[in-house]
Image: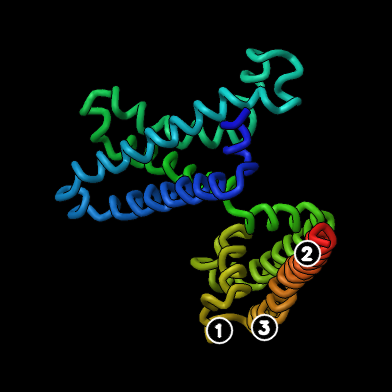
Amino acid sequence: RVVFELFEGQRGYYSHALDALIVLLILLSIALLVASSYDTVQRTEAELFFWLDLGVVVMFSLEYLVRLWVCVEKPKFAVRGAVCGRVRYVFTVIALVDLLAVVPFWVTTFLPTTVQETVAFNGAVRVFRLVRVFKFEKHLRALHLLKWVLSYHREMLLLVLSIDAAALLVLSTLLWLFEHNVNGHVFTSIPSTMYQVLLVMTSHQTPDVAQLTVAGQITVAITAAVSIVVIALPAGILGWGFQKVGTALEALRKAKKQQQAAERR
C-alpha cells in the first residue's frame, strides 16, 4: 500500500522526488535519442550511450513492474481479483506507453548484430523510443490541466476544427481549379494544393504570385485572410479554458488557506 501511495503522489515530498527522478530520466532518454542522430557522436560515444540507455531502461522497467504489481490497490483493478486486475491494467493506455518505452531496447539486445545494423530496423527502434516522450503525461501537472481543458472544450474545438478543415478543402479545390491548367507542375491535384494552402495559412511560404492567374491570386489573398481566423479561434478557446482553470485553482488555494487558518484557531 505504501508503494502504491508513493507512485500515486500521495506521499508528499517522496512522491514529488520520485516524479522528478522519472522526468529527469525521460529528458535524458530524449537527449540520448537526439544526440544519437549525429553519426560522429554515435560512433565515438556508442559505449557511453549504451550504458546510459541501459540505466534509463532498467529504471523504466522497474517502474513498469512496480506499477503492475501495485495496480490492484485501485478498486477498479481489484474487483475481479489480482490476476485479472493486472491483466486489465496491462491493456490500459498508460501501461502500454510504459511497456513500449522499454520493449525496443530489450528486443534489440537479444537480436543478431546483422539485424540491428540495418537502416530500417534502426529507424523503427528510434520511432518506438519516441514513445518515452508520452511518459511525461503522468508526471507533469500542466499536461493534466491541458487534458482537462481539451476534454472540457472538446465540442467547441471539434466544431472549430471542422470549420478549419472545410475552409482548407474549399480553398484548395478553388486554387486547384484555377491553376492546374496553367501551373499544373505545382498544383497537380487537390491534396498537393492543400499542402500549398497550409503553407500560406501558417505564413511559412506562398506560391509565386506573379505566375498565378488573377483568380488564383485572389484565392491566395482570401486564404491569407482566413488563416487569421483559423489560428485565432482554437487559440482563443484554449486560452479561455486555461483562464477558467487558473481561476478555479486560485479559488481552491484560497479555500485551503482559509481552512488551514480556521484549524489553527
| Three-letter amino acid code of the residue under disc 2 | Lys
Query: Measuring 56% from the left and 23% from the top, which residue is drawn there?
Result: 69
> Dot 2: few (<14), some (14–19), or many (≥20) neighbours within 10 Å?
few
The quarter of the image holding the N terminus is top right
Q: Nearer the viewer, residue 69 or 213?
A: 69
What is the C-alpha distance between the residues marked 1 and 2?
61 Å
Residue position for label 1: 209
> In the image, which is nearer the foreground, mark 1 or mark 2?
2
Determine whether label 1 and label 3 are within 8 Å by CB.
Answer: no
Determine whether label 1 and label 2 are within 8 Å by CB.
Answer: no
> Dot 3: few (<14), some (14–19), or many (≥20) neighbours within 10 Å?
some
Measured from the top left, where is residue 264 in percent x and y?
A: 79, 60
Measured from the top left, where is residue 25 in percent x and y?
A: 41, 47
Query: Measuring 70% from the left and 65% from the top, which residue is drawn there?
Result: 168
Q: Earlier in the sequence, mark 2 or mark 3?
A: 3
> Dot 1: few (<14), some (14–19), or many (≥20) neighbours within 10 Å?
few
| Three-letter amino acid code of the residue under disc 3 | Ala
Reply above or below: 31 against 176. Answer: above
Residue position for label 3: 221
Q: Nearer the viewer, residue 248 or 167?
A: 248
Reply above or below: 31 against 70. Answer: below
Q: Secondary structure at mark 3?
A: helix
| Three-letter amino acid code of the residue under disc 1 | Val
Q: Which mark is residue 257?
A: 2
Query: Measuring 41% from the left and 36% from the top, which residue is drawn there?
Result: 59
Q: Earlier in the sequence, mark 1 or mark 3?
A: 1
Task: Give the quarter of the image for residue 161.
Answer: bottom right
Q: Secondary structure at mark 1?
A: helix
> In the image, which is nearer the foreground, mark 2 or mark 3?
2
Q: Earlier in the sequence, mark 1 or mark 2?
A: 1
